Image (spheres, rainbow, N blue to C red):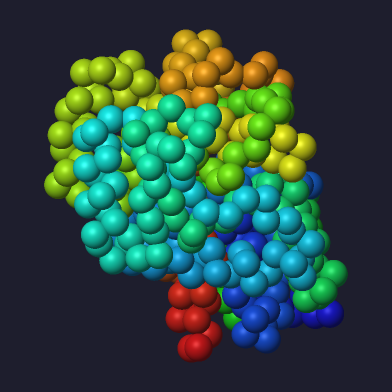
Amino acid sequence: MSSPSAPDLIVVGAGIVGLAHALAAVRLGKHVLVIDRDQQANGASIRNFGFVTVTGQERGPVWNLARRSAEVWREIAEPAGIAIEQRGLLTVAQRPAAEAVLQAFLATEMGEGCEWLTADQMPGIQCIGALHSPHDVRVESRTAVPKLAAWLEQVHGVPFLRGTAVQGVEGGRVTCTRGTYRAEVVIVCPGDDMASLFPDSFRQRRVTRCALQMMRLADPGWRLPHPIMSDLSLIRYLGYARLPEARALEAQLRVEQAAKVEHGIHLIVVQSADGSLVVGDSHHYADIPPPFAQAEVERLILDEFAALFGPPPPVIERWTGTYASADRHSMVETPANGVRLVVVTSGTGASTAFALAEQVVGDLFGK
């Protein structure tokens, strides 16, 4: 195990983006130290679906990042003791205009390996058909992120300084509440903390926050074969939304589902090992979003659930979350010599961070 005082790399932040950079570095044989202000992960990295989404990600580089990241999840899941709860994705069409979008998607390179399923092939789901993709995976983020950190620590010898606030970073030097640490390189992964380190970089990129509402429903007594998305997702996920066919669907949804579009609602449903369903979500943007969940937003999400599955089971858990948001997938900045600031600004940390980290670490260490 490396000494915390002499690592090759210091990673600031132990969310999924920080852990991804630690993993990429140890795979290159580097000694890594991770510093985080919290005793355990409690932010965006665990307040999500645990859904590693490939299908529907923005065409081009982001889609490629997602494909590689899903591959890394599959590589590390068993050795890290992380269960892959579900595989694949069903993107369900509720309207003919949605079917047109999905058929157009199937005709692109992003549709490779995917197939169209008819409504008869999906009993219990009210739809006219669905795109099935084999590329996506789903983990239980609340347990997967801590298990990944434990595996890095116990198997790969990565020390963690938790409950430690970083006060300054410059030129390969990190000053924190436990003292000063030096390394060849420092990678700062602060999530949506835009004030503590390098605030000018966040201001220049016009980064704000996106707040969301999610919930867990009781076991409905049936099993989902795959995670589910539906029509509203097709105007939010850029791999679909930027297809020409999506324009007609968006126009229709802005009329028929105006309140849901206004609240940034789209439906994702995943199922946990205990049978419960994680359902969401909504999107509201502000520098400091209010921490209060809206009953009307929850009602609208559950209404969308009911349109596919019928009356929803009881809500057994509710939560809100925030993540950094900007007009690009991510920001990778060099605010000082020997320092990288890396923030995924699209809500796709679980889906793309592993591959992004391989690029950043490879560039820094010449691999």
Q: Quadrant of the N terminus?
A: bottom right
Q: Residue furthest front?
A: 120
Compared to 258, does 321 lie above or below?
Answer: below
For the point 40% across and 47% down, the residue is 117
Give 133 or 291, whichever is nearer the viewer. 133
Count the numbered circles shown: 0
For the point 79% across and 62% down, the residue is 81
Residue 283's quadrant in the figure?
top left
Tell me: 66 left or right of 18. left
Give 322 or 332, whichever is nearer the viewer. 322
Residue 9's quadrant in the figure?
bottom right
Give 34 or 146, whichever is nearer the viewer. 146
Compared to 316, does 75 lie above or below?
Answer: below
Q: Position of residue 338 (x, y in %)?
A: 51, 75
For the point 27% across and 37% down, the residue is 98
Q: Residue furthest top?
A: 296
Residue 75's quadrant in the figure?
bottom right
Q: Position of residue 131 (x, y in %)?
A: 38, 48
For the point 56% across and 46% down, the residue is 226
Q: Is residue 124 visible?
A: yes
Tell me: 112 left or right of 153. left
Compared to 7, does 117 lie above or below?
Answer: above
Compared to 233, does 254 lie above or below?
Answer: above
Q: Position of residue 129 (x, y in %)?
A: 36, 39
Q: Is residue 212 visible?
A: no
